[in-house]
Image (cartoon, helix red, strand yellow):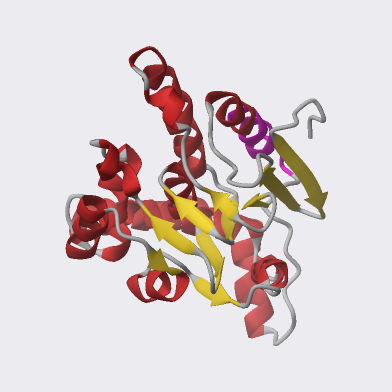
Amino acid sequence: MSNEFNLIQCEEKGHTLWITLNRPPLNILDIPTLTELKLTLDEAVNRQDIQFLVLRGAGEKAFSAGNDVKDHTPERVGPMLTVFHDVISTLLTTDKITIAAVRGYCFGGGMELAMVCDFVIATEKALFSQPEIALACFPPVATVYLARLIGHRRAIEMLLTGDRIDACQAERLGLVTRTVGEEELEAAVTEVITKLSAHSPVALRLTKEALRFSSAPDLISGLKAVERLYLDRLMATEDAREGIAAFLEKRAPVWKGR
């Protein structure tokens, strides 16, 4: 990965790229930070050797306290939203497995960044909020996506009140995948990656793609689309044939990722 950035830091561990928002203590998402993050993600999603992307914040205080309020002025809000939504779109459409490792504050744009990841692993003291209403604003990503995760009633409560919830509440609502102790965050993320790494990479990618049809207009159209994906692409892979053969032959599969 590029070493030219200082607002975003990267560390490769095997097939995993750990991406750190490096603006402690609050890791505010200003335009330069978002630009570096977008360039980092663009490079990562085009690398075949990277399977997992982990997003985290530098320091102990925050994953990210959100977008820079200074970027909400009339002359800057357009460019800010463009690059921020480009980041969100990349995370939503990539076939990599994405994990948000959250400690401390996860507010505003930081919460939006975390919520679009496939997994959200949070420490017990993490706090989540969409406080934009206090500034007479609303969070565009959360207004579209949050209700899918936690339901309309809970989403409208969070968005209209700006109230904070802790990680345990967020897990009960479905915003967080797993809550862990303060010292267990990296180990918990590594555990998830290890578990997923035992499965076929191509099956993981196609399962993510199939899940996107969960928002199809109706069940039948979604099911037909997934059926075509299953028959035309999944069953054409070497890994699908290997998985069935290994099960029938009572042996461990050997994945080729294709």
Q: Indicate whether residue 208 is drawn in magenta.
A: no
Q: How far across and down, in percent of the image, does residue 232 sit? A: 45, 50
User: Closer to the camera, 105 or 203?
Assistant: 105
Q: How far across and down, in percent of the image, does residue 18 sit? A: 72, 50
Q: How far across and down, in percent of the image, does residue 111 sit? A: 44, 51
Q: Is 24 drawn above or below residue 238 in the view shown?
A: above
User: Closer to the camera, 133 or 85?
Assistant: 133
Question: What residue is shown at x 30% (from left), y 59% (from top)?
Answer: 163
Q: How many marks?
A: 0
Question: What residue is shown at x 74% (from left), y 79% (from top)?
Answer: 252
Q: Is 63 drawn above or below residue 79 in the view shown?
A: below
Magenta highlight range: 38-48
Q: Indicate whether residue 47 is drawn in magenta.
A: yes
Q: Which quarter of the figure has residue 10? A: top right
Q: How far across and down, in percent of the image, does residue 102 sit? A: 57, 60
User: Magenta region's main secondary structure?
Assistant: helix
Q: Which quarter of the figure has residue 144? A: top left
Q: Is residue 32 left or right of residue 108?
A: right
* Quadrant of the frame with the N terminus: top right
